[in-house]
Amino acid sequence: MKNSVILLVSRNRIFGVYLKRLIESWGSPAVFTVSEAGEIAEKIRQYTPDLAVIDIQNEEDKDLLELEVLLKENHNIHSVLLIPDELIDILIEDSDEMPFGFVPKPFEENILKISILAALRISKAQRELQADEEFLSTVLECMKEAVIAIDDAENIVMANPRAEELLSKKISEFIGKNFRDVFVFRDFEEKEGVELITREIPFEGYLVANKNIPVSVNYSQVRGKNFHGWLITMNDISERFQSRKKLEESYKHLEKTLMGTVRTISKIAESRDSYTAEHQQNVAVISAEIAKRLGFSEDRTKWLYIAALLHDVGKVSVPSEILSKPAKLNQFEMELVKLHAENGYQILKDIPFPLEIAEIVRQHHERLDGSGYPIGLKGDEILLEARILAVADVLDAITNHRPYRPALGLNVALDELEKNKGKLYDARVVDACVKALEEGNLVIGSLKENDEPY
Ligand SMILES: [Fe+2]
């Protein structure tokens, strides 16, 4: 009770002074006032009382009941009323709500003391609760995230103003409703609606409101004394989403530019030798088909496709008379042609491709038994991509015209692959290639139909 300031209101000055002395003898500073409104307001401003004791002398003091309501509503000050015993029924029956506390007169001093003490405690607890609530509501109002609390039945029990903004709806329109009926989400790919609770969290998607708003959603389980449910937070990520989209677009544009450049280089290399026109394109298509059958990822397949488009780029440094010589090459000429594998590596090695494109190109004439060139690598020393290129290269070379011979046909190519399967060529790669041919995914002579998948 100490340090709690009590405001005393009585129209009986003598009784008021008595009360003031009595209360002060219990250790509380007491401020006495008659019931004049201006004076009360001044005392409240000056002393910020914790509690009021309002003395009702007779029925004419009935208006002081309104003072009790006014103090509570406008100043958050609770009151204890002193009411003549015979008026209690009349006054309290007439009033709209029970007063915070009352003591019948005549009163015993101890009863008044206990009533004031109890009222101070309750009032303090209520104020603390109110302060907590105000703090919480200020925090929720200031949060940039939408915050929504749902109970275990998924009904919305609380939402902050940001949630209203995102939905373009007043809280009163959706409080108490089922979360899934109010908050509808869609994948960024605009597919099915998202089941929030069963979905992996956190997730990002569109919140379907007036317009689709990209949001990131998170939630945590709440297991409190009085509340079981979920706290869901939602962030508008429009800005981040836009920059991500721009980045994706510019990446796609870059990739397109890269593919265009690769094709141009590929065609420049082939232009020196009309007999091998589209050879690299064909090998790229065959390689990609084999890679898919071997379980390559989309990305790895794409980089193999690019390596295939460039695999003979080293031929730019081989004289075109040799490349298009309509007769079998002598040993010296053959050695010159063989240089194209290493030359291709030298041309490509400084381009920062994500995969070892240059190394794959260098190894495309290596053979499992070590009989290939330029290094004579064996078995697994040869990159799988290069082993695929080797098979695709042989298949396309045998089934097409060469300056020194006509096309030999698919059967000759298959004989060569089967005969040397496991010896020169990787058995798994040959099998995948043969299967693709048998199943009609590769049709020699019509490879252009698979043209430019990237
Ligand atoms: Fe080659």
Image: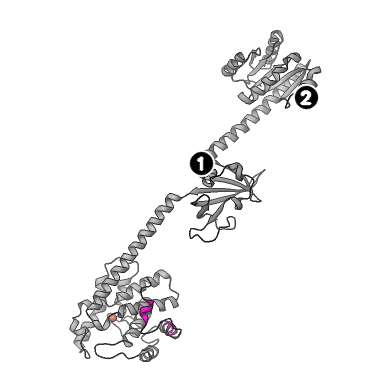
Q: Is residue 300 above or below residue 278?
A: above
**Which image quadrant for residue 201?**
bottom right
Magenta stretch encompasses residue 362: no
Please state the quadrant of the image where ligand 1 appears: bottom left
Q: Which amino acid type is marked by label 2?
A: Glu
Q: How far from the left and from the top, in percent, is residue 84?
A: 78, 16
Horizontally, residue 102 falls left or right of residue 197, namely right
Evaluate whether residue 343 shows in this view.
no
Quadrant housing the C terminus: bottom left
Element type at mark 2: helix
* Neighbours of disc 2 within 10 Å: few (<14), some (14-19), many (20+): few
Taking depth in this image into account, of 383 and 434 the one nearest to the observer is 434
Identify the residue at horizontal 59%, vertical 50% (top origin): 182
State which region is magenta.
Answer: 430-453
Evaluate whether residue 392 shows in this view.
yes
Q: How far from the left and from the top, in percent, is residue 257?
A: 31, 65
Identify the residue at horizontal 38%, vertical 78% (top origin): 449
Question: Which circle marks residue 143 in the picture?
Answer: 1
Mark nearest the camera among 1 and 2 is 2
Q: Which amino acid type is marked by label 1?
A: Met
Question: Which circle marks residue 93 in the picture?
Answer: 2
Report the residue that reaches farthest toward the top. 14
Label 1 and label 2: CA atoms lie apart by 45 Å
**Which image quadrant for residue 99?**
top right
